């Protein structure tokens, strides 16, 4: 088995969202052939409705907070913010676009 097939097999068996040769697996593959993902550094990372640090998305206000197993897929850079989609820990793509502050999320070496 090639290394990419082994990686894909591990991703599918564990039910994780992951990359193999630049392809995003699970339901999230419908978002895009994503090449840029981020995960929250902590559950205090903000999910924003607009590129404004005080404009929390209505789904993520009050007692709602983002867990560290969620994934953000970047679609665009807007000033010092990233705009994109959220993917739940189970692989479901949220139907709305959000903004994040990259300092609050771990985006790897991209």
Image (spheres, rainbow, N blue to C red):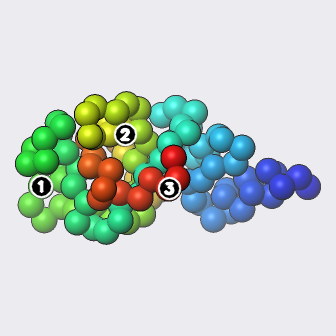
Of marks 1 and 3, which one's residue comes earlier in the chain?
1
Q: Characterize the local packing of mark 1: few (<14), some (14-19) or many (20 or more) Cα atoms within 10 angstroms.
A: few
Q: Residue 104 location in percent, x, y?
A: 29, 58
Q: Does residue 94 appear in the picture of this structure? A: yes
Q: Residue at x 35, y 65 (%)?
A: 41
Among the two numbered marks 2 and 3 on one chain, the one whose residue lies closer to the N terminus: 2
Whether residue 43 sits left or right of residue 90 in the image: it is left
Please tell me whether mark 1 or mark 3 is closer to you in this view.
3
Residue 108 disc label: 3
| Helix, strand or loop under label 2 | strand
Mark 1 sits on what residue? 61
Q: Residue at x 34, y 33 (%)?
A: 77
Q: CA distance from mark 2 to mark 3?
A: 17 Å
* Disc number for residue 48: none
Residue 58, percent from left and from top: 13, 46
Which residue is located at x 12 percent, y 55 percent?
61
Residue 10, image x and y in percent? 72, 62
Q: Is residue 108 above or below residue 85?
A: below
Q: Is residue 92 visible?
A: no
C-alpha gap between disc 1 and disc 3: 26 Å
Q: Any mark on residue 85, and which?
A: 2
Which mark is nearer the camera, 2 or 3?
A: 3
């Amino acid at each position: 088995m090639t290394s990419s097939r082994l990686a894909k097999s591990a991703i599918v068996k564990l039910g994780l969202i992951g990359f193999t040769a630049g392809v995003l697996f699970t339901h999230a593959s419908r978002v895009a052939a994503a090449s840029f993902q981020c995960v929250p550094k902590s559950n205090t990372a903000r999910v924003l409705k607009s590129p404004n640090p005080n404009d929390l998305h209505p789904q993520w206000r009050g007692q709602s907070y983002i867990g560290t197993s969620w994934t953000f897929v970047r679609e665009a850079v807007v000033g010092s913010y990233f705009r994109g989609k959220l993917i739940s820990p189970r692989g479901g793509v949220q139907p709305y676009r959000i903004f994040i502050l990259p300092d609050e999320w771990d985006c790897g070496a991209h």
